Image (cartoon, rainbow, N blue to C red):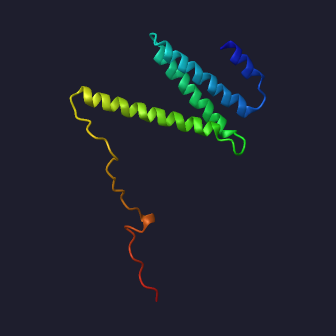
Amino acid sequence: MAEATNLLKQLKDPYQKKYYHGIVLERQAKAALSRRTPGSEHDAHEWLTEAMEAFEAAVAVRPAGNDDAIRAVSLYCELLSGAVLDGIRAEIAASGGDVGELSEPPAEEVPATEADGAGAEASPPAK
């Protein structure tokens, strides 16, 4: 870990510093999760949060055409949403609820706005 931190200090490009800092934090989190020791999940959460922040900072200064940091943020969002859904399903199942066949959520009706033309009163005819 110390070697990776020292190498980060040698980087000059702001994007590379931020992006590779995120990578180092991500690897720390993965190592903590694989240890499965008391507190390792908390440590992993902290490091993943910091990694997300580093990737978001890298997105802000990324070179044109380089989408690596954007893909990292997207991947984390997908992983987190999947973990949340898994937790909800487990909680429902543990409470005796029937998760059943999960399919697409029902379509929600979105109320029309004035910008859509709804609710706008008709203009009086031109004279």
Q: Measuring 37% from the left and 67% from the top, which residue is drawn there?
A: 119
Residue 33 in picture, x, y percent from top left: 49, 18
- Which quarter of the picture shows residue 9? top right
Q: Measuring 68% from the left and 13% from the top, which residue is drawn there?
A: 2
Residue 120 left/right relative to 62:
left
Q: How many marks?
A: 0
As drawn, the residue found furthest toward the bottom would be 127
- Work out whether 39 lies above or below 115: above
Residue 87 left/right relative to 62:
left
As drawn, the residue found furthest toward the top would be 38
Q: Measuring 70% from the left and 45% from the top, which residue is drawn there?
A: 65
Q: Quadrant of the N terminus?
A: top right
As drawn, the residue found furthest toward the left would be 96
As drawn, the residue found furthest toward the front would be 101
- Which quarter of the picture shows residue 98? top left
Q: Measuring 58% from the left and 27% from the top, which residue is drawn there?
A: 51
Residue 32 in picture, x, y percent from top left: 52, 16
Residue nearer the viewer, 6 or 33: 33
Residue 4 in picture, x, y percent from top left: 69, 18
Residue nearer the viewer, 90 or 59: 90
